[in-house]
Amino acid sequence: MKSALFGLSLVLAIAALTPASPSLAGVSQNDETYADRRERPGMGRSEADPIGADFDLPPGLELVSPMMGYNTSNPEDCDHKYEDQAVGHGEDVRLCLVFRNRTGGPIRLELPPGLVFVSRNRAVQNGMLAKRVAIEVPAGERFFQPLFLYCINGERDGSNPEEAYGVGPVIGYPEMVALFRFLETKDVNASNFAIVAATIHELNNFGKLDAFAQSQLDSLPDL
């Protein structure tokens, strides 16, 4: 019951904060209503840089730039760290982060939901976190961490080991923030993260969820 009520609250919050949008049924990328939908910088078909709050690393911690795409089949360039050592979820944007910790001790880094990693190639998707992730970075010159993200540009290509990324802002659009809050108490894992990906796609393209997407979101188990 609590999950259903929370889901209803999400629908109401999104409906109140966003304009009416067409149903997914029968809507293609060539439809005028689709082409005229509200676009946001760095999301959907926009090639502009994303807009949001700045994200800063803790003192003494550096992130090697640019960040390169993660090679899922052969992660040699990511210190041979395989998928089971990754944080975050997503299939289309997968990166290998390389940290330098100059403090002499471990640093716990938290990456917030809404944090965007921006592709330097506008034909390749930007990636976004939907749930907070924590990374324990030991002292040293090089610590490798695979990071999986949700795509926010459905018409672009996915990441690959040849593509470079930079750290972007933390977006704060109301319907996305409502989703992040909803997911805080949900168990998102390798078997169900596609539901979150589909939700982000709908919110990104239409500003709200249809009944089927909402029912799928409500099906996510509690932590």
Image (tube, rainbow, N blue to C red):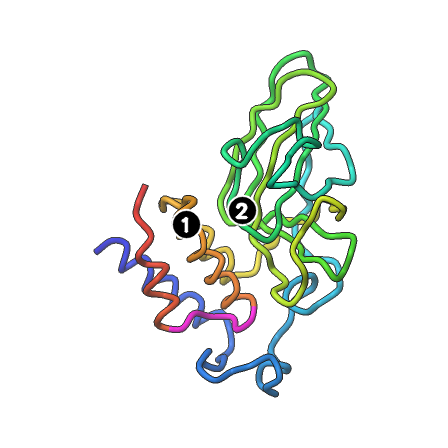
Task: Give me the residue at 69% from left, 45% from top.
Answer: 54
Q: Measuring 59% from the left and 53% from the top, which residue is drawn there?
A: 92
Q: Earlier in the sequence, mark 1 or mark 2?
A: 2
Q: Are marks 1 and 2 in contact (CB under 8 Å)?
A: yes
* Quarter assignment of residue 187: top left
On screen, 83 above or below 23? above
Task: Establish if 196 lies above or below 81.
Answer: below
The answer to whether 202 appears left or right of 94 in the picture is: left
Q: Position of residue 59 (x, y in %)?
A: 70, 25
Residue at 73 percent across and 41 percent down: it is 68
Which quadrant does the C terminus fall into? top left
Could you tell me the amino acid type at mark 1? Answer: Leu
The magenta stretch is: 205-210
Residue 51 vertical placement versus 133 (above, below): below
Pointer 2 residue: 113
Q: What percent of the width, then of the height, locates residue 127? A: 62, 52
Which label belongs to residue 183?
1
